[in-house]
C-alpha cells in the first residue's frame, strides 16, 4: 500500500510516523520560569556534533495554547534534557499530563531534582545523563502547531556510575514505540 501524506488527516500521519520511526528516544525536558516544569517529548533526536545540536518538536495543549515547556524555552532560552531510565518510567509518564501553567510536575509527581549547573534548570535525580541547552533556532513549519526547536548543547552531566574512560556511557534507556514505551537494554554487535 502506498499512502500519500497530503491526503491523510494529521492523526493518521502521526500514527504512521510514530510507528515507523522507532524506537524514539525521550527527551525529559526540565525548564524553569514559574517553578520547575518537567515534561517528556518523543519527537526528539540529535542533529549535529558541530555545532553540538539536537532537535525537539513541541506541540500545543488540547486547548490550543502553547505547552509550558515551549513558553519557558522561548522566554528563558534554556533547558536541561535528562535521559530516562526504567526507574523513572511511571513518573516520566505522569509528567506528560497537562497541568495549569505554573503548576510544577516535579512537585505534583514527586520528581526529585538537583541543580548541578547554576545557570541552567536542575537535572532529574537518577538520570545517567543530562544535556544543558540553549535555544539555537526555531523552525517555522508553515501553519503547523508543532514548533521544532534546535537546541545547542552547552554542557553535559554524566553520572560516574554510568560513564567509563573515554566517555563510554552505558545505561538502560526508555524510548517510544508507537504509543507504548520500550526498554532499550540489549546491545548487539555484528
Image: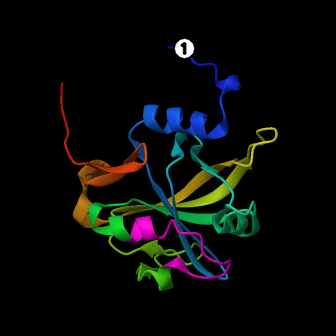
Snapshot quadrant of residue 141: top right
User: Residue 187: x percent and y percent?
Assistant: 20, 39
Which residue is more in the foreground, 177 or 81?
A: 177
Pinpoint residue 157: horizontal percent, then vertical percent: 41, 64
Depicted 189 relative to depicted 109: above or below:
above
* Residue 183 located within the stretch drawn in magenta: no
Q: Which residues, given as a range, are shown in magenta? A: 91-105
In this rendering, the answer to whether 188 lies above or below 99 is: above
| Left or right: 92, with 73 as reference point | left
Give above or below for 184 relative to 133.
Answer: above
Q: Nearer the viewer, residue 182 or 123?
A: 182
> Which image quarter holds the C terminus?
top left
Q: Which residue is mark 1?
A: 2
The image shows residue 83 at horizontal and vertical percentages of: 40, 59
Q: Position of residue 162 (x, y in %)?
A: 25, 60
Outermost residue on the top side: it is 1
**127 lies left or right of 31:** left
Overall secondary structure of the magenta section: loop
| Left or right placement of residue 115 versus residue 189 in this view | right
- Residue at 54% x, 46% y: name it: 43
Q: Nearer the viewer, residue 58 or 45?
A: 58
Crowding near the residue tagged with mark 1, few <14, some 14–19, many ≥20 C-alpha atoms within 10 Å: few
Q: 164 or 145, which lies in front?
A: 145
Please say whether residue 95 is one of the residues in the magenta stretch.
Answer: yes
Secondary structure at numbered mark 1: loop
Amino acid at each position: 500500500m502506498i499512502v500519500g501524506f497530503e491526503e491523510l488527516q494529521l492523526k493518521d500521519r502521526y500514527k504512521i510516523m510514530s510507528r515507523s520511526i522507532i524506537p524514539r528516544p525521550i527527551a525529559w525536558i526540565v525548564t524553569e520560569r514559574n517553578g520547575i516544569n518537567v515534561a517528556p517529548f518523543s519527537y526528539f533526536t540529535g542533529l549535529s556534533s558541530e555545532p553540538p545540536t539536537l532537535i525537539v518538536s513541541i506541540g500545543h495543549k488540547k486547548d490550543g495554547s502553547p505547552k509550558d515547556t515551549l513558553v519557558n524555552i522561548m522566554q528563558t532560552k534554556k533547558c536541561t534534557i535528562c535521559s530516562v531510565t526504567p526507574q523513572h518510567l511511571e513518573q516520566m509518564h505522569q509528567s506528560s499530563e497537562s497541568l495549569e501553567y505554573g503548576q510544577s510536575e516535579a512537585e505534583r509527581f514527586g520528581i526529585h531534582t538537583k541543580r548541578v549547573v547554576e545557570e541552567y534548570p536542575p537535572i532529574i535525580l537518577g538520570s545517567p545523563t543530562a544535556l544543558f541547552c540553549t535555544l539555537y533556532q526555531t523552525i517555522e513549519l508553515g501553519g503547523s502547531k508543532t514548533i521544532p526547536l534546535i537546541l545547542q548543547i552547552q554542557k553535559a552531566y554524566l553520572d560516574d556510575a554510568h560513564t567509563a574512560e573515554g566517555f563510554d556511557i552505558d545505561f538502560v534507556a526508555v524510548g517510544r514505540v508507537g504509543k507504548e514505551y520500550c526498554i532499550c537494554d540489549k546491545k548487539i554487535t555484528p
